[in-house]
């Protein structure tokens, strides 16, 4: 991978589970395995699965990472797993879209223990008309964060689907809830310690305000314990013979502005259009995603502490992905866990003011994104991602002017006969604008998949 500026273009490093660094030139070596096996008899409903993936970057700063390393026990459509596992959370396209607002595939997976469903599971006595998909998990952030340490993750989600698996029209709705809590921070704490313990854990999972400890500070006692954030999502899927349509909307919350209906302008809106049939034309578009993300409102410019405690009135300035106590914000190894359009300060400080030591200096964003996928000459597959954003910084540290940015990518891949079917891929990406360094870059890669007969049959059951 190379680039003209020495910085990796946006769409070459984004949504790669954190394995592509910010700088070029580099060589990336990536490998791994996934294993599925029944527990007991061959037709048992119990299964064991594991996955290990390793990524090594050879560049000015060599590094080795394990973006996936986990073990799981599965029973029918239920799963308990421990470790790092690739996931995304929310009703949004996870392939050629920009990524779910709160939990995309932009950062390396966080190690956790999780129990939940594998996809949607029918609710008893509804004959498949009503299904749900959810999980409950606890995790731990990296130890060498910028300002915090020993930070814990609480996460849960629940989505409901109205309509059977093969219904022409299906409706979706649900929520996700994430909390950073229980670690150490030099900001707004007593002796550097954030609230912890079982009494506060109850407040974490329920969102109840206030610190349960006998000795509290004003910040913890007047707010919810920890950094709470998530989305409430709605979606609709329409199936026709030739095409499927998926429409979605993610509504953002970080304090009470969504409850007070003062930040309804903010959120992710998208539509995915997918052709169900391919006709072998010389050039085909088989899938398209169009998205609009808006985060500039944040409940307005005013924040009134007294009204916030009473859950009424003006309490805007949500400051998405930043937190006054957890200054390194909604990030993992300095990558945003959610939408990549809210980027870390390290990506923009070369030109625009650094917002103290907060994670991001730019969370008031308007973004238009188009993702396209198709086929060329029958055996060449292509993907394109095109994004245009306007950026105005944060409420506390606004940019002196509206900053415009275009980032784009075109990628081609073809299966070749070498080693019984290897895939060769080439990509070109560009950043043009004022937010990031102007950069043009390219990547060429080779990939080989090996699947044994036993693993193939087991994976088919998933």
Image: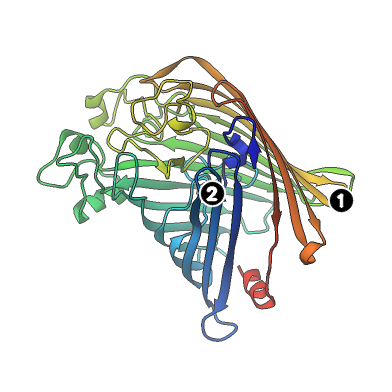
- Furthest toward the bottom, the residue is 41
- Furthest toward the left, the residue is 214
Quadrant, the C terminus: bottom right
- SS of the residue under disc 1: loop
Q: Which residue is label 1 attached to?
A: 378
Does 16 appear above or below 415?
A: above
At x 47% / y 68%, what residue is drawn?
71
Q: Would residue 399 be found to the left or right of residue 93 on screen?
A: left
Q: Would residue 416 be found to the left or right of residue 166 on screen?
A: right
- SS of the residue under disc 2: loop
**How dense is the environment of label 1, judged by Cα within 10 Å: few (below 14), some, or many (20 and up)?**
some
Does 78 appear above or below 227?
A: below
Percent x, y of residue 56 = 54, 54
Does 359 appear above or below 100?
A: above
User: In the rendering, which numbered label is found on residue 43?
Assistant: none
At x 54% / y 35%, what residue is drawn?
268
Q: Would residue 398 be found to the left or right of residue 8 on screen?
A: left
Percent x, y of residue 442 = 69, 39
Does 165 appear above or below 282?
A: below
Q: Quadrant of residue 404?
A: top right
Residue situated in front as seen by the camera: 391 or 18: 18
Q: How many marks?
A: 2
Q: State the CA–CA distance, disc 2 to disc 1.
A: 31 Å
């Amino acid at each position: 991978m190379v680039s003209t500026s020495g910085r990796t273009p946006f769409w070459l490093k984004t949504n790669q589970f954190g394995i592509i660094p910010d700088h070029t030139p580099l060589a990336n070596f990536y490998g791994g395995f996934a294993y599925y096996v029944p527990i007991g008899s061959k037709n048992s409903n119990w299964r064991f699965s594991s996955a290990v993936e390793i990524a090594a970057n050879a560049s000015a700063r060599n590094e080795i990472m394990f973006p996936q390393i986990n073990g799981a026990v599965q029973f029918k459509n239920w799963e308990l797993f421990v470790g790092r596992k690739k996931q995304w959370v929310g009703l949004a396209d996870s392939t050629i879209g920009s990524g779910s607002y709160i939990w995309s595939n932009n950062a390396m997976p966080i190690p956790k223990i999780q129990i939940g469903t594998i996809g949607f599971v029918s609710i008893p006595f509804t004959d498949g008309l009503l299904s749900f998909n959810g999980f409950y998990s606890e995790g731990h952030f990296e130890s060498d964060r910028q300002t915090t340490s020993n930070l814990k993750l609480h996460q849960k989600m629940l989505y409901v689907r109205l309509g059977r698996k093969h219904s022409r029209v299906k409706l979706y709705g649900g929520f996700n809830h994430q909390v950073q809590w229980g670690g150490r921070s030099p900001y707004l704490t007593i002796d550097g310690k954030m609230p912890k313990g079982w009494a506060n854990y109850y407040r974490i999972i329920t969102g109840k305000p206030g610190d349960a400890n006998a000795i509290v500070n004003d910040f913890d006692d007047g707010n919810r314990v920890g950094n709470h954030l998530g989305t409430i999502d709605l979606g609709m899927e329409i199936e026709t013979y030739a095409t499927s349509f998926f429409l979605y909307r993610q509504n953002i919350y970080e304090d009470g502005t969504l409850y007070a209906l003062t930040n309804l302008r903010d959120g992710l809106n998208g539509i995915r259009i997918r052709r169900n049939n391919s006709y072998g034309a010389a050039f085909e578009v088989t899938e398209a995603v169009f998205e609009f993300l808006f985060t500039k409102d944040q409940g307005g410019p005013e924040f009134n502490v007294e009204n916030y405690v009473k859950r009424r009135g003006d309490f805007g300035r949500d400051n998405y992905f930043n937190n006054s106590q957890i200054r390194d914000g909604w990030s993992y190894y300095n990558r945003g866990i959610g939408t990549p359009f809210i980027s870390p300060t390290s990506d923009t400080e070369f030109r625009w003011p650094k917002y103290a030591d907060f994670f991001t200096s730019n969370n008031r964003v308007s973004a238009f994104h188009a993702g396209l996928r198709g086929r060329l000459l029958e055996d060449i597959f292509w993907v394109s991602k095109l994004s245009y954003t306007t950026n105005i910084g944060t409420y506390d540290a606004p940019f002196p002017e509206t900053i415009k940015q275009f980032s784009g990518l075109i990628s081609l891949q073809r299966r070749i006969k070498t080693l019984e079917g290897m895939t060769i891929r080439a990509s070109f990406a560009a950043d043009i604008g004022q937010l990031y360094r102007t950069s043009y870059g390219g990547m060429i890669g080779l990939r080989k998949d090996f699947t044994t007969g036993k693993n193939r049959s087991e994976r088919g059951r998933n």
